[in-house]
Amino acid sequence: MQMLGVDIGGSGIKGCLVDTATGELIGERHRLATPQPATPAAIAHTLKALVEHFEWKGPVGCGFPAIIHNGIAKSAANIDKSWVETDAAHLFADVTGLPCHVINDADAAGLAEMRFGTGRDRKGVIILITVGTGIGTAVFVNGQLLPNTELGHLMLEGMVAEHYCSDAARKREDLSWGRWGKRFNKYLARLEFLFSPDLFILGGGSASKLDKFIDKIETRAPLVAAASLNQAGIIGAALYAVEQQK
């Protein structure tokens, strides 16, 4: 089955058609810059432009950088604060004219990795971490998702963790991959202390750079790159939309 998956982030809104039976992207991924300020109306109309690019007429799956309860945003990480308590699913459907199903962006990436990627057929506690403008997390226990964990907002070194070791922090402070890797290792150590995971999966743009800092990672649980790298959010959003049609 084909489905349009969209990954809405703090800097870019990316989408592609997905074969949900195989997890493969169909055609070329399309990216639009996230509008600034990233208000509900602005993001909704950017999503509409993305949908129109693909000439898509069916349901849309959207990964979104917020705690999502029944389609409603309960937080606003790296987007405008006016999103809090906004019914994102209803707004997107109203603007695009299509059914829109919204899930936390890291949870979407996790669904893709557990279905098609590194987490497939793995038992135990698995934590997927997406590193980009912020840090998102998805926690699975024996394949079951614990939604909306938002562990990028743990306190670390006197600040919110994503302000300390996100990719945006690396760029802002002009850190080498090695120096950034030491910071990220501290973050993983905190997660390991709290959850005793069996595996860490790294998603987001940093996943393709794992070889540049893996020597700084000292956790008991192995850290591996997501099989779909930076495409997991798109694939997982499409999977979520298919599930909502049943």
Image: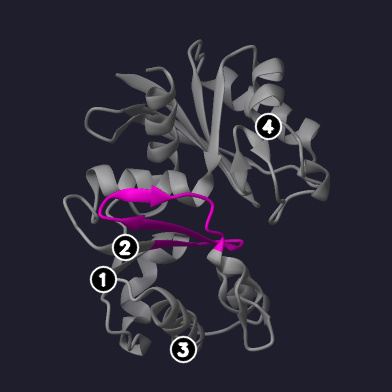
Which residue range is magenta in the image?
128-150
Task: Say few, some or many: other residues with alpha carbon within 10 Å of mark 4 (under 14 / 14 to 19 / 20 or more).
Answer: many
- Which of label 3 and label 1 is nearer to you? 1
Q: CA distance from mark 4 to mark 1?
A: 34 Å
Provide the secondary structure element on which disc 1 rests.
Answer: loop
**Amino acid on which the number 4 mark rests in the picture:** Ala
Say the numbered circle drawn on residue 90: none
| Residue corresponding to mark 1 | 198
In what element is the residue under mark 4?
A: helix
- The CA span between labels 3 and 2 is 21 Å
| Category of crowding for the residue at label 2, using alpha-carbon neighbours closer than 10 angstroms: few (below 14), some (14–19), many (at least 20) | many
Q: Residue 212: which quarter of the image?
A: bottom left
Q: Which mark is residue 182?
A: 3
> Percent x, y for residue 49?
64, 24
Q: Are marks 2 and 1 in contact (CB under 8 Å)?
A: yes
In the image, taking residue 19 as reference, residue 109 lies left or right, namely right
Inspect this view and state whether residue 231 appears: no
Give the mark nearer the N terminus: 4 vs 3.
Answer: 4
Report the residue marked by disc 4: 88
